[in-house]
Amino acid sequence: MSSWSIQDLEYWDARIREKAGEFGLSCFPQEFEICNHEQMLGYMAYHGMPAHYPHWSFGKSYEKLKTLYDYGVSGLPYEMVINADPALAYLMRGNSLCLQILTVAHVYGHNDFFRNNFMFRDTRPELTLGRFKLRADRVRGYVEHPSIGLQAVEEILDAAHALSLQCRRHTAIRKLTHEEQQARALDAAEPPHDPFERIHRPVEHRAPDLDRVPLEPEEDLLLFIAEHSPYLADWQKDLLHIVHEEARHSIPQIDTKIMNEGWASYWHHKIMNSLDLPEELHLEFLVHHNQVIRAHPGGLNPYYIGFR
């Protein structure tokens, strides 16, 4: 039996949201779902999404997480937050009231980070959940198609997953258009100015091959194959695009893990200390907070490093 009610969570959510506004946090509207440990394991395996395309690797991930949890090798997170508008967070049903309050404050730190960090500017959070559902429907459509089927779909998804992280990581650097790449190739082919050209042998000018594909080295392997392969059918290219789009959604979270957790930990600490909690809740908060941000011997704790 939980030591809290939905009314308790609504009360503390309103208090925390008010404090977040006073501190200047700018957040998406926030929604919460209460889940048990089995549901949390499922969300973890499927990257937190309520709708996701099927693939055996996600089932494998679920079985691994469940086995580790059942044998006490690893625990479960207190929450998961989805970069969406409105933002979606999952809270564990077994959390105590203090832990739920702490978790809600932590969630608003993540929410502010998702909305304002530069790395997430192109993720289109207002479309996140809808896009994941549409992609899942498309993949299931290919699986159920009589001329395609599960095995053919899995073969493409297996290959796509292997290349999914081979894409552009530096969103601050704009990719040149094809015309800009051609102009740069022409400029690079021009012989450099030689102040002693009268006594030197003229440098032979070689026109660049402007029809070469790619014109410049391409780091986004999955997208390049999807757009240029002469051997793939349209449905196969669509599967590559689906995996590529989901990887592009995940990469900002991978690249900002330490900063993101540090930001959320800083704000949950600041907000919790401003709430005038009852003494027993405040003492429990201090215990949980120090457990979260403590250093891990022989390992890296992103909460500890980011908070420090």
Image: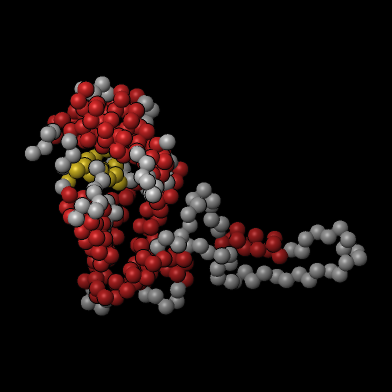
The number of numbered discs placed on residues in the rendered structure image is 0
Q: Quadrant of the C terminus?
A: top left
Where residue 280 sits, quadrant-wise, is top left
Q: Is residue 156 left or right of residue 92?
A: right
- The location of residue 77, given as percent across then percent down, is 26, 46
Image spot of residue 25 (x, y percent): 37, 31
Residue at (31, 25) in percent of width and height = 273
Q: In this view of the protein, can residue 268 be seen by the observer? A: yes
Task: Work out which quarter of the rendered image holds the N terminus and state it.
Answer: top left
**Can you name the residue that lies furthest to the right here?**
199
Coordinates of residue 155 in the picture (x, y in percent):
32, 74
Q: Residue at x 45, y 73 (%)?
A: 229
Classify 72 as above or below 117. Answer: below
Residue 195, by quadrant, is bottom right
Residue closest to the far front = 297
Q: Residue at x 58, y 67 (%)?
A: 215
Q: Position of residue 144 (x, y in %)?
A: 21, 71
**Vertical comparison of 292 with 74: above or below:** above
Above or below: residue 136 compared with residue 274: below
- Taking depth in this image into account, of 88 and 162 the one nearest to the observer is 162
Q: 144 or 278, which is in the foreground?
A: 278
Q: Residue at image x 53%, y 56%?
A: 175
Q: Quadrant of residue 116 in the image?
A: top left
> Can see residue 28?
no
